[in-house]
Image (tube, grey):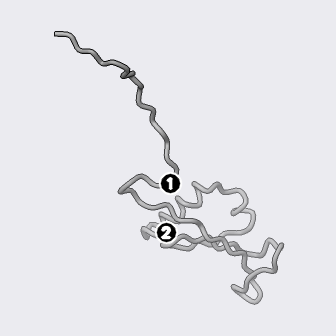
C-alpha cells in the first residue's frame, strides 16, 4: 500500500510558554504596597518618602515590614510570607 501526501509537510510542534497562571491553577494577584508613618500611626507617607513601615498585601493577607526589610526582600519571599500569614502559620 502506498500513501501519497502530496504537498503535505511535517512540522514539529513548538511549546509556547504563556504568561500568567496555568488553567485551573491559582490566579496570581498583584501585591499592594503602601508606605506608612508611625506618627500618626498608619497614615500614608508623603510621596517620595520611605516611610516608617511598609504594608504589603495581596487579596488574602497583609504583612508589615521596615523599609530596609522590604527593599531586601524579593517578590517570591514576599509572596511566601503572605501565603504563610494567610494560612495562619505566622
As drawn, the residue found furthest toward the bottom would be 40
Q: Quadrant of residue 67?
A: bottom right
Rendered residue at 61%/56% (across/down): 75
Q: Which residue sits furthest right?
A: 48
As helix, strand or loop, the secondary structure at mark 2 comes to helix
Relative vertical location of residue 88 with respect to residue 16 in this rendering, above or below = below
The answer to which image quadrant residue 36 occupies is bottom right
Does residue 73 lie above or below 50 as drawn?
above
Picture quadrant of residue 25: bottom left
- Res. 56 mark: none
Q: Dot 1 corresponds to which residue? A: 20
Task: Give the x, y percent position of residue 64.
Answer: 63, 72
Neighbourhood count class around disc 2 (C-alpha, 10 Å): few under 14, some 14–19, many 20 upward: some
Tell me whether the residue at label 2 lies in contact with that at label 1, contact meaning CB atoms closer than 8 angstroms: no
- When the figure is inspected, residue 22 is found, relative to residue 38, above or below; the finding is above
Mark 1: which secondary structure?
A: loop
Camera-nearest label, 2 or 1:
1
Residue at (30% x, 18% y) in the render: 5
Query: Of 61 and 25, which appears nearest the observer?
Result: 25
Identify the residue at the far top of this view: 1
Q: Position of residue 88 (x, y in %)?
A: 43, 70
Left or right, 64 with reference to 46: left
Seen in the image, is 34 located left or right of residue 12? right
Residue occupying the point 54% across, 62% down: 81
Along the viewing direction, whichever of 2 and 57 lies nearer the viewer:
2
**Percent of width and height locating residue 77:** 58, 56
Going from N to C along the chain, the mark reached first, 2 or 1, is 1
**In terms of depth relative to the viewer, which is nearer, 17 or 25?**
17
The disc label shown at residue 85, or none: 2
Q: CA distance from mark 2 to mark 1?
A: 23 Å
Q: How many numbered marks, from 0 up?
A: 2
Amino acid at each position: 500500500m502506498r500513501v501519497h501526501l502530496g504537498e503535505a509537510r511535517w512540522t514539529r510542534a513548538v511549546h509556547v510558554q504563556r504568561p500568567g497562571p496555568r488553567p485551573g491553577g491559582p490566579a496570581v494577584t498583584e501585591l499592594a504596597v503602601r508606605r506608612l508613618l508611625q506618627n500618626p500611626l498608619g497614615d500614608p507617607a508623603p510621596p517620595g518618602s520611605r516611610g516608617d513601615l511598609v504594608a504589603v498585601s495581596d487579596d488574602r493577607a497583609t504583612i508589615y515590614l521596615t523599609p530596609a526589610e522590604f527593599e531586601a526582600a524579593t517578590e517570591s519571599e514576599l509572596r511566601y510570607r503572605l501565603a504563610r500569614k494567610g494560612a495562619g502559620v505566622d
